[in-house]
Image (spheres, rainbow, N blue to C red):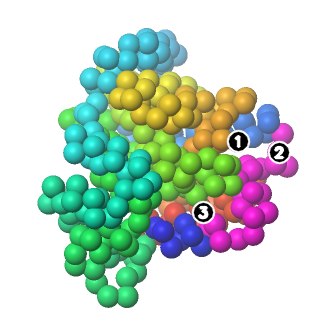
Amino acid sequence: MKKWIGRLLSGTEKETETGAMASMTLSRDDQEQLSADLDGAFYRWLTASAGYNAPRETEEQVIAELKALALDPGTASELVPRIPELVSQLLTALSDENISTGALSRQVGQDLVLVAEVIREANSAYYRPVTPIETLDGAVTMLGLNGLRMLLARIAFRPLVRTQSQGVARQLAPVIWGHAERCAFASSVMAPGLAAGVFESFLAGLMQNLGLQVALRIAERHGEGGKVPGSGAFGIELFAASRELSSVIASHWDFPPDVVDAIARVGDPDPSHLAQALAQGDRIAKLRLLLDAEIIDEDDSLVVDGLNGFQRRCLGKLADLAK
């Protein structure tokens, strides 16, 4: 991870700054239309086996319930599992830029599953150590502060997104988690050129899909035959409502205010830098999954017109996450 992110950010300062600016040759209206087209296409693909042509009344009922739920943070938060306490404590400790690797090793060492995950990550293709790393201290040193923070965040969120009890949400959970991982990585790559925090962008990318799992369960409950409304127009609405729900849950869990704000403000006329990084990461991740599924081609207008050269480099590198 660290190596390919480093390579993406190793260009000139001008290239990085330009890379962070999404499609400057397009008007705001054109950018909004491309985003809507992508969201609609992604939702239709996501729900291809679980969607049906629902009446508009059903779609409106789903969106209304989601908006009402967003006004009740306590109830909304109870619909998803909590982050494991130890991981939450570790992420808090990692906010201290001066914490030593020894202190980190001692905290991670409290959980054998975490120890195994950290050592496995340090020996992965992203880091490519010259010799295999076999100790926790060596693994923590290899990953570094940000690498360890990102890994712990992924470990914390993986069961929240992927573990669903039943129905459409369970069926689609692996794809939603695949998008969340790719969105987190892409958002963290876009962050430096937008003066946004790298880890905060990564965290926002993981967090924004949490509300989508709840939204799919509600959509299925209002749907017919264990299915959800499948139109692209409804998908656009559902993604917006589920992001609002994710932001509410993040706030209730005391996530950093800028992360909460970024999730809520994706698509706003005047988004924060972090919201811009998240929006770009979300777009790149969706395109990666549609390309991998052969729904679109590399020369599709969603890619050619929707991304600049820097963003397309990131799009190409995201293919490595599946390996």
At label 3, which amino acid type do we have?
A: Cys
On screen, residue 26 above or below 7:
above
Q: Residue furthest bottom?
A: 130
* Label 2 secondary element: loop
* Label 2 to label 1: alpha-carbon separation: 10 Å
Task: State the image coordinates of residue 312 (x, y, percent, origin top left).
Answer: 66, 62
Residue under label 3, please give it: 314
> Disc 2 vs disc 3: Cβ atoms closer than 8 Å?
no
Which numbered disc flags the more N-terminal residue, 1 or 3? 1
Relative to 270, say whether 187 is above or below. Answer: below
Q: Tell which tag, 2 or 3, sits nearer the viewer.
A: 3
Quadrant of residue 188 in the image?
Answer: bottom right
Q: Are marks 2 and 1 in contact (CB under 8 Å)?
A: yes
Q: Which quadrant of the structure image shows residue 113?
A: bottom left
Name which residue type carries label 2.
Answer: Leu
Kindly report the distance in space between the C-alpha atoms of the residues bearing marks 1 and 3.
19 Å
Residue 34: mark: 1
Question: Which residue is rendered at x = 73% and y = 29% of the image?
Answer: 269
Question: How would you rate the neighbour count of disc 2 (Cα within 10 Å): few for under 14, some for 14-19, many for 20 or more?
Answer: few
Query: Could you tell me residue 142's position as x and y percent?
Result: 38, 73
State which tag comes first along the sequence, 2 or 3: 2
Residue at screen point 39% across, 68% down: 143
Where residue 130 sits in the image (x, y, percent)?
37, 88
Q: Quadrant of the C terminus?
A: bottom left
Which residue is depicted at the point 20% across and 63% down? 115
